Amino acid sequence: MKRLFALISAALMTLATTTVHADDHAAPANIVGFVYNFNVSNPAGVVGALTEYWNSPTGKKNPATAILRQHVSNGDDPSTHSIAVVYTSIAQIDEANAINAGSADAQRFLATMSEAATVTSEAMFFSTGVTSGNPAIVPAQGRYTLNTGIAVSDAAAYVEAWQKYINALDSNGSATNLFVLNGMGDQAATHAVTVSANSMAELFPQNPAGQEAYAELVSAVKDIRTVENRSIYVDLAVFGN
């Protein structure tokens, strides 16, 4: 938890993502951040810790945005929730670290989080700037996201195939993002793809044209991309200034 605090609280707080989840906005290429997955024993305690921190004098100075998510489906991953901490530059990470250093507000956040949740994994993500869909679909309570972690051996070829796929979709009801991942430990995923929508129906439209385009994508990338994990989560709350 102290390692988490050094990054999240030192920075507190959206991908294409990944369960590692990469977070995600319909965002410019300079979006960068961290995602922390938790097994939460006290959901109200987590919400309380985030709320108290962001309302504190320290939290009001923090340049980051934090997105609390509940995991709807993630296979055998033991995490129940995650927090994505998002910045618009690497420099903001250093700024947040300096703001939180020695802060009593940050220490209280650490103590409350330690009692309410256990960290199961963490990762850093960088937006590639490769996005599509409706830019109005942003982190907000009730937004659903399908996050897919992938291991890519030829990033340029994958991006070309993926852009062809998303350009074939009628995506007014969703927003997609592609993220590069770092700090993954022994996990093989190098990128995350996120698809976000304001409802389950819009996240999984019954669209034959989309299914055909997806089949073409799978065929095009079968030798350069391996799916490592998939998860579905819903935004519970967004904190920031």
Image (cartoon, rainbow, N blue to C red):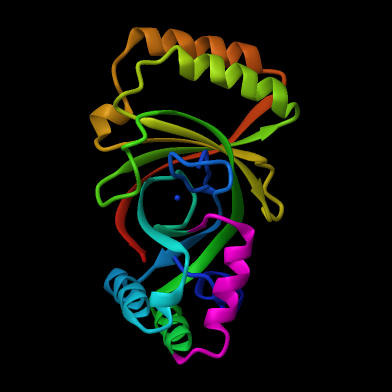
In the figure, is residue 176 to the left or right of 190? Answer: left
**Who's the residue at 49% across and 51% down the image?**
77
Residue nearest the observer in this picture, 195 or 87: 87
Classify 213 as above or below 196.
above
Q: In which quarter of the image is residue 179?
A: top right
Location of residue 157 by image quarter: top right
Main SS of the magenta part reads helix
Estimate the x, y position of residue 65 in percent, counting from the top left: 42, 61
What's the magenta region?
86-104
Which residue sits furthest right? 153
Q: Say which residue appears at 53% left-offset and 63% top-offset.
A: 120
Q: Is residue 158 above or below residue 28?
A: above
Q: Quadrant of the N terminus?
A: bottom right
Q: Is residue 85 visible?
A: yes
Question: Can you give x and y, in whole percent of width and height, for residue 124 in the image?
Answer: 61, 55
Residue at 46%, 72% in the rendered image? 62
Question: Residue 69 lies in magenta, yes or no?
Answer: no
* Residue at left offset 47%, top offset 64%: 64
Image quadrant holding the C terminus, namely bottom left
